[in-house]
Structure formats: C-alpha cells, structure tokens
C-alpha cells in the first residue's frame, strides 16, 4: 500500500525562459488533471512582467503565488505534483532551490527563440543534480526555427542528447499536426483553445496512401524523409538514458491550443522517475524507508507586519509525514509538531493528515526554519544537495540609525534564513554584504527591514562579480590566498569563506596564481564542476 503511494508519485518542475509558455502549459496540465476547470486560473497568479521596478506589485503577487507554489493533481492513478519555479528574473534563486526538491523537469522552449539565457542557467542546475529532462517545444502554431536546428541547438547549448518522440508537420500557418514516432499515429491540428482531444489517425506504415490524403502529398513526402533522417541520426529512445539524465525526449506542440500536451503528460507519467533516494551527510535515504524524513526548500513570509507568520515548504523524502506527530528538527536538535500542515491543490489549500515521499507539505513556521533544514523521526542527519548559488548582484548594507543596529542585525539574518538574499560578512570592518540574483530584491529587503524590524538602511553598490566558495588540500596555498585576498574574502552564514571576485579577470588571476585551490559557484561543491566550467555562460547577463 505504502509502496504504491511512492511509485505513483511524480514530482517535477516546469522550467523555461519567461514567455516560452510555462504558465500556459501548467494550466493545461491542471485542466487535464481536473485540478482546475477554467483557463486563466493560473494565469492570474502570474507575476506581471512589466512591473520591473514596482516591487509592491511583486509583493502583491507573492501573496497569491504561495497558492501556486505546489500544484498537485491526480491523473490516471498517478499523483502529480508540479512545483512552481517562478520565471521572473528576480526570482531565480528561489527557482534554483525549488529544483533541488523535484525528481524531474519539463523544459519549455519557444520554437522561434530556441535556447535562451534563463534556460541555460536552469539547465545548469539540472545537470549538476542529474535531473531527468523532457523537452516541450512550444508555439508550433507560429513560425519558428527548423526542428532539426532546434534539436541541434539544445544539444550544443545544454549539453544533453535529445530524442524526438513526436515530429511536427509544418509550422505556423502551415502547421498540420505532429506524427508520434512511437505510437505511429498522426495527430491533426486545428487551432482550439478549449477542447481537450485531437483528431488522431493511426498510420501503421508511413508509405501508406492515407498519409498523403490526410496532409497532402508534398507534406507526406517531407515527413517520410524527415522520419527516415531521425531514425538514422538519433539513437533509439531508451528510458534508462532519460532517467540517467543523459538523453532528453522531445515533444512538439502548442500549449495554448492544447495540442501535443496530452502525449506529453501521458509519456511523462509513464517514464518520469518516482521519488528517488537522497544523500544526507551520513547515508543515502531510500524513499521506501519506514521512517519519515524531509527537508525545507522554500520559506514564504507573510509581509503583513501584523501577521508575521511564515510557511516553510517541506519536501517529504521517506516514510510518511503525519499531522500532530513529533519530529526532530536536526539543526536545532529539538522536537517539533505541526497541527496544521497544508497541502496545495492548484488554488486550494487544505489541512492534511498525512503525506508521502514526493509530496510537499506547507508547515506553519514561527521562525524556526532555515532553507535546507532537515526533519526526521529521530535520526541526526542533514540532507545534502540544497546548495546556495552565487548571487549576481551585491550591495553593502549600511545602517542609517545606530540605535537600531540590533534590529537590523536580527532582520537581515531572518530574511537571509528565508532565502530572500544571502549575507556575507567581511571581517575587516565587519562589513555586511548582501547578495541577490536581481536588483529588485534590494528594494524588498530595504522595505521589509524598515517595516518589519524598524531598521532604516542604505544599500550601497559594490564592485563584485561573483561569490566563489573555495577549497584546497594545499594548506599553504590556502593561507597565502586568504592573506593576499583578505579584502575580498567574506564569510557566509555557515562561516565558510567566500572569495568575492571583482571580475572574470580577478577570478582567472586567482586561479592561475593558486592552481591548487578549487573555486565553486555553489555552497556544495561535489557536483558543480560543470557549473564552474561554464562560468562564461553563467556570468553572462
Ligand atoms: P511563461 O509562463 O513561460 O512566461 O509564458 P506564458 O504561458 O505566459 O506564455 C507567454 C505568451 O505566449 C502568452 O501570450 C501565451 O498566451 C503565449 N503562448 C503560450 N503558448 C502558446 C502557443 O502554443 N502558441 C502561441 N501562439 N502562443 C502561446 P501573452 O500575449 O503574453 O499573454 P496572453 O495575453 O495570451 O495572456
């Protein structure tokens, strides 16, 4: 029974560059799952793309976005959990962290735009964690790039092998549908934003005259040629390669027209991994273990100073989570109990009695949680693989009112525990450096420090390009580096030193001068070698 709960769960995130169609696809998946009944339900929660400097708008949206943090629904016996990965540029760190709580992802690509900046960054995180990826190439109802060129670009830019499972027939005004390479079926397209099924024609043999009748002789000839090419060029699809994150199956469609979405969902539930074992600091935890364990990957604060409650999002990793049961908060070494754990079904929030691996539970938090905290039934351990990523913008936090130093200190520590930003402290002069992934977060922090903690402060620009955690087995080099770069070294919240490089040149110089030192763009280093190597891309903004 319990094993069944585990096997039927699919917890994933949809990632894309803004505008590629993530919200639209999410909505269609929820429609299929019966979790929502009208289009537009998710859309209205979307962050207004134009409100780039009006952070109040963001805060308003934040209030709503808690409802879309996790969207669970039932589909053909599967329990599907979509974890929302906010697409707005300024929410990138939150997005990165959410990717530590999923078992797989669906990557949405706009067929006219191909691989874009945010796609690259998010895929870097997926590669680092070997997360299986399915690609959905969207907007085929519009003129886009040649499908072969798109696959080529995906392989080149994202460092993953691809394997089309459907193939488009025409594009834009000439878009006629897709051919399913596995079901050997033709799915004919007619623009329609509301209906759910497509016209399907089974084609056992591509040479059949039926194909010419359905899509015209010219299109049929082209399709035959392209399918022959695919079979010749691409390796046959192997589920294991997908689950090993070596190969990404590719689907073509049009989310807004509900076209190609059902094949995507059917294949997804069939091949995507159920909850997987996870590493901790002492041993690997299997999801089928009897005892509960989980970790906090996201904290959502209520910005109303009269209701300073927070919701901590806990990903269940093993066993069964139960309401009102005592669990060990391993960092605080304290027993904790939750009377009102919540689950999320699209726009509805409800109190739950139990949850299984792969589920996400919202826990009422009085301020006891930090991102990465672990809960167990008594075993003292900490989940790994929830790193912090190098911020992209840095500011010095300057207190404007010396009488409020304590409040500022408390405020900035609490905000960084929530993951709103990262705090680094330079010992020389006790300088507090705040790092975020986008400018707007500074406005949010300033506002919250003032309104929630009564601390008025300034954020002064700093010339910092990236934060590098560093390690070395060569003690002599490590000491010399720390002496020489004293001014550019600060400490993170766990008291680990980071090198705040002013530019690629200072990073390159440091690497040349200290060849035995390894530099890391995340706070957990084992698997981030690819990321360090792709620093050129990562740094491009
Ligand atoms: P995002 O979450 O990735 O940012 O993208 P979103 O789903 O909001 O889609 C971005 C825009 O692309 C939307 O248009 C959406 O309607 C459109 N779109 C999504 N899928 C398709 C598709 O298959 N074909 C076409 N032609 N367009 C698609 P918008 O004008 O920004 O918003 P709206 O006015 O339509 O709501």
Image (tube, rainbow, N blue to C red):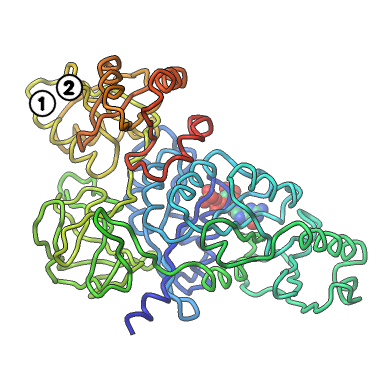
Question: Which quadrant holds residue 364?
Answer: bottom left
Quick one: which residue is furthest to the left in this view? 403
Q: Secondary structure at mark 1?
A: helix
**Is mark 1 in CB contact (under 8 Å) with mark 2?**
yes
User: Is the N terminus in the top left, top right, bottom left or bottom right quadrant?
Assistant: bottom left
Q: In the rendered view, would you say 190 is above or below 17? A: below
Q: Which residue is tagged 2?
A: 399
- Ligand 1: does it lie within 8 Å of the C-beta at label 2? no
**x then y, percent, for residue 198:** 69, 73
Q: Which residue is tagged 1?
A: 405
Question: Which quadrant holds residue 433?
Answer: top left
**For this rendering, which residue is in front, 257 or 75?**
75
**For this rendering, which residue is in front, 171 or 417?**
417
- What's the residue at 77%, 77% (across, down)? 201
Question: Which quadrant holds residue 292?
Answer: bottom left
Callout 2 crowding tier (Cα within 10 Å): few <14, some 14–19, many ≥20 = some
Q: In the rendered view, would you say 122 is above or below 468? A: below
**x then y, percent, for residue 490:** 25, 25
Q: Which mark is residue 323?
A: none
Whether residue 442 is visible: no
Whether residue 193 sits left or right of residue 351 in the image: it is right
């Amino acid at each position: 029974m319990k094993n069944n709960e585990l096997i039927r769960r699919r917890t994933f995130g949809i990632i894309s560059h803004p505008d590629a169609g993530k919200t639209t696809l999410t909505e269609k998946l929820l429609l299929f799952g019966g979790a929502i009944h009208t289009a537009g339900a998710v859309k209205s929660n979307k962050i207004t793309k134009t409100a780039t400097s009006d952070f109040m708008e963001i805060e308003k949206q934040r209030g709503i976005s808690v409802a879309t943090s996790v969207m669970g629904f039932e589909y053909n016996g599967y329990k599907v959990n979509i974890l929302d990965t906010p697409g707005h540029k300024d929410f990138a760190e939150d997005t990165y962290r959410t990717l530590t709580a999923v078992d797989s992802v669906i990557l949405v690509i706009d067929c006219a735009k191909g691989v874009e900046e945010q796609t690259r960054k998010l895929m870097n995180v997926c590669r680092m964690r070997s997360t299986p990826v399915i690609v959905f190439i969207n907007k085929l109802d519009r003129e886009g790039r040649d499908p072969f060129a798109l696959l080529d670009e995906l392989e080149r830019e994202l460092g993953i092998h691809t394997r089309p499972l459907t193939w488009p027939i025409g594009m834009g005004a000439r878009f006629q549908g897709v051919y399913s390479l596995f079901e050997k079926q033709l799915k004919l397209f007619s623009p329609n934003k509301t209906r759910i099924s497509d016209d399907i024609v089974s084609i056992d043999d591509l040479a059949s005259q039926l194909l010419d009748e359905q899509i015209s002789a010219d299109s049929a000839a082209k399709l035959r040629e392209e399918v022959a090419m695919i079979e010749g060029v691409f390796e046959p699809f192997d589920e294991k390669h997908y689950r090993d994150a070596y190969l990404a199956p590719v689907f073509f469609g049009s989310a807004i027209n509900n076209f190609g979405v059902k094949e995507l969902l059917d294949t997804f539930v069939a091949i995507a991994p159920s909850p997987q074992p996870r590493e901790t600091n002492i041993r690997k935890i299997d999801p089928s273990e009897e005892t509960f364990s989980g970790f906090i990957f996201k904290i959502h604060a209520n910005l109303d100073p009269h209701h300073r409650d927070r919701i901590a999002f806990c990903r269940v990793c093993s066993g069964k989570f139960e309401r009102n049961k005592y669990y060990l908060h391993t960092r605080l070494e304290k027993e904790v109990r939750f009377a009102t754990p919540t689950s999320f079904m699209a726009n509805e929030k409800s109190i739950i009695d139990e949850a299984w691996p792969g589920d996400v539970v919202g826990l009422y938090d009085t301020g006891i949680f930090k991102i990465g905290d672990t809960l167990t039934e008594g075993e003292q351990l900490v989940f790994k693989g929830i790193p912090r990523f190098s911020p992209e913008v840095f500011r010095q936090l300057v207190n404007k009112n010396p009488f409020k130093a304590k409040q500022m200190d408390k405020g900035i520590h609490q905000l960084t525990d929530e993951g709103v930003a990262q705090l680094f402290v330079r010992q020389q002069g006790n300088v507090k450096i705040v790092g975020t992934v986008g400018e707007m977060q500074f406005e949010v922090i300033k506002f919250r420090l003032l309104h929630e903690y009564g601390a008025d402060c300034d954020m002064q620009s700093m010339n910092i390009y990236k934060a590098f955690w560093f390690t070395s087995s060569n003690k002599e080099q490590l000491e010399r580096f720390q002496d020489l770069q004293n001014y550019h070294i600060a400490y993170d919240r766990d008291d680990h030193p980071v090198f705040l490089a002013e530019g690629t040149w200072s990073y390159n110089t440091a690497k040349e001068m200290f060849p035995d030192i390894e530099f890391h763009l995340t706070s957990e280093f084992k698997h981030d070698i690819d990321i360090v190597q792709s620093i050129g891309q990562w740094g491009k903004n």
